[in-house]
Amino acid sequence: MTQSNNPVWQRLVWLAFFYCFAVFNWCLYLGLSLRSGAFFKKDTEQEQLRFAISRDQFWNLSKQPLPGFEHAFFKLRNGLKLHYLTNRLASKNKSNGTGKGNLFVFLHGFPDSSMMWRYCLKEPAIPMQSARLVFLDLPNYGGSDTFDSPDTSVLEAIAEFVIGMREEHEQAASEDQKTFQTVIVAHDWGCVIGFRLAAEAPQLADRFLMTNGPHVGLSLSNKDRVIASSTKIFKQFKESPRKNLGCLRKSFNVLKPLLIQILMFGYIFAFHLPSFMVKYLGTGGNMAFLRGALRFAHGKYKDEWDAPQSLAATLGPGVIEVETKTADGEGYGKSLHERAASNAAVFWHQTAYYRNGLASKVWEKSLEIIADLYNLENEAESSVSASESPIRRRSSSSSSAALWIEQYDGALRAPTTILWGEKDRAVGKTICLDGIGDYLARGSEVIMLPQTGHWAPVEKASRAAIAKVIGVYASTPAGEELPTHVTKEVDAVYSGSVSLVRK
């Protein structure tokens, strides 16, 4: 978190501010739970029973976790396992036509798991029988193994996983349905990962569908822009304070969105504190912090809030569930036993994403991933003519565009649709979305959902919009490019939605 090129005294000042602000937020969150009374709330026997039943329902490998879904595991080259949910049984049934269809891989965020997408399954537009749906648990979350240092190794793992799912889906398809589209659907940390994949491994998917997660390069660029503008105005005030008194107020107003975003990101600072403080933040007061975050996810739709069920979904398997097996004899990885025995360990490993540089470190791809991505691009180019190939068209347009315009660091090279909840209280629009059009590939779109907060896949109105878009992509015939603009379809189920950017 330090600036290595700055003088030592500046780095020390920055570290002092960073950790003082971290402690302030740690105290703030605990103080808010104390003030609300949530810190002292104890579960009733009925709530404890509800939690145990939900945990068994979600994480017992011998049972169906969600209607139409089954548990499955993907073993990575490094030996660790990723857990995911899939409607694979339906997709294998070629007799009723469900072997046909596109592939959708869903990436959740903090502090969720694959179970977060259960809310979207309530929407009739979700293509349960006409597409392959894969809900992945990110490393360190849900039923996936723990990565000791979840940095760019997470990008490597997810790229390997998506490639594996594509190969498996192709093998399960009938001979006349070998051509299909792959869509990555993401939220929060899943979006951070998705943006990096769309920029650095665009061959993985034909389209990315993002909901309320920051593009780190854009956010840092906006931060620098705001500071530079504020500083320039403040210098005018310094030159003649009496004459330019209004510049002081203008300087602050320009800086204000950044200050608000820093306050919104206060929990990130707190997650960098010593482990005992981070663990207590997550588990103290009967997990008041987690309960508050999960309750906040429902926005104004509190009627769907079920604390025991939500906690069971985010904490992953317990000591009983971790010993279960699938019908094929597959079980959870060894690292799950530590998390199953300790909610504090669960929270510590989940928050590791904020401490290990996943968002910003350089991704040095393995030779295996490089070869796989190269093969994916060649397969796409050979499957259809150059004029019809989405990947070839993206590659050629990107290379020619580079001759005429400046390429932004982290610019996306795959078509991306962004559905953004305007009332997000975690990832603000001014710092984390403004200017995104400069980073988008051709065929991309940004749609604003004015009545939605951060958890678009959970809130009723916005999840209907997400399901509608997924349904549109699922209904696209094999071999045809996915629709580039879907504002009309979104507006049909979410009144007041606005298309901000079209490319």
Image (cartoon, rainbow, N blue to C red):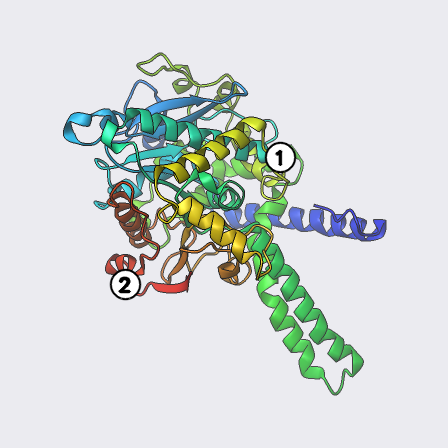
Left/right of residue 262 with respect to residue 86 in the rendered view:
right
At 71% from the left and 73% from the top, the residue drawn is 232
Amino acid type shown at disc 1: Glu
Measured from the top left, where is residue 29 in percent x and y?
55, 48
Per the rendering, the mark at residue 440 is: none
- Is residue 54 visible from the viewing direction of this image? no
What is the quadrant of the C terminus in the image?
bottom left
Q: Name the amino acid type tagged 2.
A: Ser
Q: Residues within 10 Å of mark 1 (few under 14, many from 20)?
A: few
Residue 324, picture quadrant:
top left
Q: Residue furthest bottom?
A: 243
Question: How many neighbours does mark 2 have within 10 angstroms: few (below 14), some (14-19), or many (20 or more)?
Answer: few
List the residue tagged with mark 2: 495
**Rendering coords of residue 379 (x, y %):** 41, 34
- Closer to us: 473 or 236: 473
Residue labelled with disc 1: 364
Q: Closest to the observer: 470 or 348? A: 470
Residue closest to the far left? 96
Q: Is residue 26 above or below residue 276?
A: below
Residue 144: x, y in percent? Answer: 46, 26
Task: Identify the residue at image location x=46%, y=45%.
Answer: 293
Q: Answer whether residue 181 is visible to the viewer in this image.
A: yes
